[in-house]
Image (tube, rainbow, N blue to C red):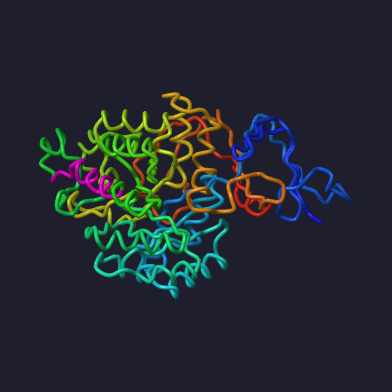
């Protein structure tokens, strides 16, 4: 018997409506009753959690770990280390790898690689369409058998609504949720930044909010038609929030997630043409940020995630139009959301923040995770909600450095990450 006792922390376990200062016991990699502790107390590690929050291991359901194919940006090993350093015990990786994760063989490769090298749980998604080309369906039934937790063409978006309908119907048959990167290719064309004042002033091609809203609307119609869950990834526009809110009020199985950069930064940040402010969907207006905050506050947007998108320096150090979209997220997201949502804007409390990182993604993806129930895997995140710290990208665990948040001072962060009863990272 081996184990750990985490002493005197504030245990917040939204799945069990629990919020109390108490000891948490881990025995042989599982959450246990205190009475299960037998034998030599000296075999038990003790962790003093006074003043800390003891939360179920956080889940980030939207990350790019880049393997197979782009190991110069990130590997499953380095991405999992970045996850642990950010307080995440489980990450869900996107299929836009090379080859794309559109076959059981590639899913098996990812799972194998994760089992051998990752210090956190890595759950793969499968593609909706073959090679993410949006022309022919991927083998959704075989992907399900291979163990994907959802299907998505993230990075791309199926434009053919009939093909998307069939994908949603297949996904329903095999019980997989559908995640969608909402981008209408005709409306967005070659857009690189939010279409508005700053795109006009700087002469950069615009990516209109309607390019996202049109596909959010399509997804609402298909979720209703097929009576199946569609989840809109990285929602950025006020119109999308309004559409999702109205549809949810009608009982439609539609949901949405938010990334920290869409709250922390507005489109005015692109003035210096720094490619670390180039994302897809783009940074939007202050009115959009206000709408996202309201959507988080009233539950319309139920999940927080990073869209962690590592790129090598040589790829980002080019002119704005040519640079790839995306920034790192795993090591800054919890701090940014704690600082902005809980401390600064006071839109949600810390219990809801933890719920949006645990219960909500676990429910959507039907995961046995996100709880501190007796018998559950001992995935635990210790959070100091008031710790003041400064983001230093040269200290990141990620293999890449593309973040616009270097030097930001934040309040609140994870201080220890435990996966299966084992501490995999600590401040
Ligand atoms: Zn995306």
The image quarter in which residue 100 lies: bottom left
Q: Is residue 315 magenta?
A: no
Q: Is residue 214 magenta?
A: yes
Q: Is residue 131 left or right of residue 399?
A: left
> In the depicted view, which residue is nearer to us: 295 or 207?
295
The quadrant in which the N terminus is found is bottom right
Residue 297 at x, y = what percent?
A: 42, 29
Q: Is residue 348 left or right of residue 275?
A: right
The quadrant in which the C terminus is found is top right
Q: Is residue 108 left or right of residue 235?
A: right
Residue furthest out toward the bottom? 105
> In the depicted view, which residue is nearer to us: 283 or 59?
59
> In the depicted view, which residue is nearer to us: 394 or 369?
369
Which residue lies at the image location 44% right of the left edge and 30% below the top edge? 341
User: Which stretch is magenta?
Assistant: 205-219
Which residue lies at the image location 34% right of the left edge and 45% below the top edge? 234
In this picture, is 424 found above or below 98? above
Residue furthest out toward the right? 39
Residue 426 at x, y = what percent?
A: 61, 45
Q: How many marks?
A: 0
Residue 254 at x, y = what percent?
A: 37, 45
In this picture, is 216 found above or below 285? below
Residue 301 at x, y = what percent?
A: 40, 38
For the stretch drawn in magenta, the main secondary structure is helix
Which residue lies at the image location 43% right of the left edge and 58% below the top edge? 150
Which residue lies at the image location 17% right of the left edge and 51% below the top edge? 321
């Amino acid at each position: 018997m081996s184990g750990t006792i985490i002493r005197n922390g504030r245990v917040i376990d939204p799945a069990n409506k629990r919020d109390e200062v108490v000891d948490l016991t881990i025995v042989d990699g599982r959450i246990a009753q205190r009475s299960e502790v037998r034998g030599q107390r000296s075999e038990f590690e003790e962790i003093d959690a006074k003043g800390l929050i003891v939360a179920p291991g956080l889940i980030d359901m939207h990350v790019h770990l880049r393997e197979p194919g782009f190991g110069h940006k990130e590997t499953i090993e380095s991405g999992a280390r970045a996850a642990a350093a950010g307080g995440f015990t489980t990450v869900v990786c996107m299929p836009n790898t090379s080859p794309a994760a559109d076959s059981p063989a590639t899913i098996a490769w990812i799972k194998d690689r994760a089992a051998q090298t990752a210090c956190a749980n890595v759950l793969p998604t499968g593609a909706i369409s073959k090679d993410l080309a949006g022309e022919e369906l991927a083998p959704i039934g075989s992907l399900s058998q291979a163990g994907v937790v959802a299907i998505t063409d993230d990075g791309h978006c199926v434009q053919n609504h009939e093909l998307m309908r069939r994908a949603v119907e297949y996904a329903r048959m095999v019980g997989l949720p559908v995640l969608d990167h909402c981008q209408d290719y005709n409306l967005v064309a070659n857009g690189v930044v939010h279409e508005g004042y700053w795109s006009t002033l700087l002469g950069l091609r615009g990516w209109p909010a309607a390019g996202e809203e049109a596909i959010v609307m399509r997804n609402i119609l298909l979720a209703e038609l097929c009576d199946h869950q569609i989840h809109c990834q990285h929602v950025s526009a006020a119109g999308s929030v309004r559409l999702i809110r109205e549809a949810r009020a009608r009982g439609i199985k539609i949901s949405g997630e938010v990334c920290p950069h869409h709250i922390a930064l507005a489109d005015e940040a692109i003035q210096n043409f720094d490619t670390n402010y180039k994302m897809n969907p783009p940074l939007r207006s202050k009115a959009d940020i206000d709408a996202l905050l309201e959507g988080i506050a009233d539950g319309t947007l139920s999940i927080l995630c990073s869209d962690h998108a590592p790129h090598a320096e040589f790829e980002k150090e080019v002119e704005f139009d040519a640079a790839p979209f995306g920034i790192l997220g795993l090591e800054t997201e919890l701090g940014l959301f704690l600082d902005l949502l809980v401390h600064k804007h006071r839109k949600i409390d810390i219990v809801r923040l933890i719920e949006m990182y645990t219960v909500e993604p676990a429910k959507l993806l039907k995961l046995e995770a996100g709880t501190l129930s007796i018998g559950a895997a001992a995935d635990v995140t210790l959070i100091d909600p008031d710790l003041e710290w400064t983001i230093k990208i040269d200290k990141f665990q990620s293999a890449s450095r593309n973040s616009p948040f270097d030097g930001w001072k934040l309040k609140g962060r994870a201080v220890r990450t435990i996966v299966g009863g084992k501490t995999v990272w600590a401040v």
